[in-house]
Amino acid sequence: MVHLFTVSKIYPPSYPALTDIQLDIEKGEFVFLSGPSGAGKTTLLKLLFREEEATDGQVVVNGRNVARLSNKGVARLRQEIGLVFQDFRLLARLTALDNVALAAEVVGMARRESRRKAFHLLRELGLKDRHNAKPPALSGGEQQRVAIARALVNDPLLVLADEPTGNLDPEMADETMRLFAQMHQRGTTVVVATHNTGLLERFHHRVVLLQQGRVAGGRKECPAGV
């Protein structure tokens, strides 16, 4: 699903964010990207959905070298990827339902179908009675669930989450991780970037450790799962 071959990323004028990254993530895996702030986790995720381009090396996602994609190719790639961010990035003027449905409409889904699917996802995530609420009226945990529903509405092959529990209390963080586990159980490949070592101890998935832009180690997935 994801293959990085000696990938480096240097920001101007000469800041090495990533250096010689070798990484393989197979279809259906759940992987934590771990490491302190500044280790390169966010940059690595941005390379996968082509928000940034590698300075050297190759980034292959679902069989495609992302550096060779046309604008249409990048758009198709992003349709296959669900993105979840620490700051949620919801549109404050739209309801929860509209925030989720919009993500489907922008890639061509009919409005009626997008709203039907959005409502189903929100109900599945425990937000049936909150679908008409706007983000400022939602708790942090509710906003995160809306963001997860938005990430899932296009049935992505790959979900990328950048510090998705950073703004949540421990109980809500664990609930959020259980939602990612549900995605994984459906067959979705999930990559979660986090510096929260407590999550790694409680949720036993493969860990890739980054330090100063390099892969420093990790652990194999625990058979016990979540």
Image (tube, rainbow, N blue to C red):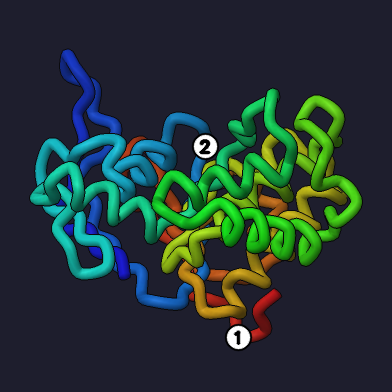
In the displayed structure image, the side of residue 3 where residue 148 appears, left or right: right
- Secondary element at image label 1: loop
Q: Specify few, some or many for label 1: CA neighbours under 10 Å numbering under 14, 14-19, or 20 or more.
A: few
Q: Quadrant of residue 136?
A: top right
Foreground pick, 136 / 51: 136
Q: Earlier in the sequence, mark 1 or mark 2?
A: 2
Image location (x, y in percent) of residue 117: 64, 62
Q: Is residue 35 visible?
A: yes
In the displayed structure image, the side of residue 159 where residue 51 appears, left or right: left
Foreground pick, 108 / 29: 108
Mark sitting on residue 223: 1
* Residue marked by disc 2: 36
The correct choice, above or below, for 68 with respect to 140 in the image is below
At 73% from the left and 58% from the top, the residue drawn is 119
At 50% from the left and 72% from the top, the residue drawn is 188
Quadrant of the rendering where the C terminus is positioned: bottom right
Image location (x, y in percent) of residue 64: 17, 63
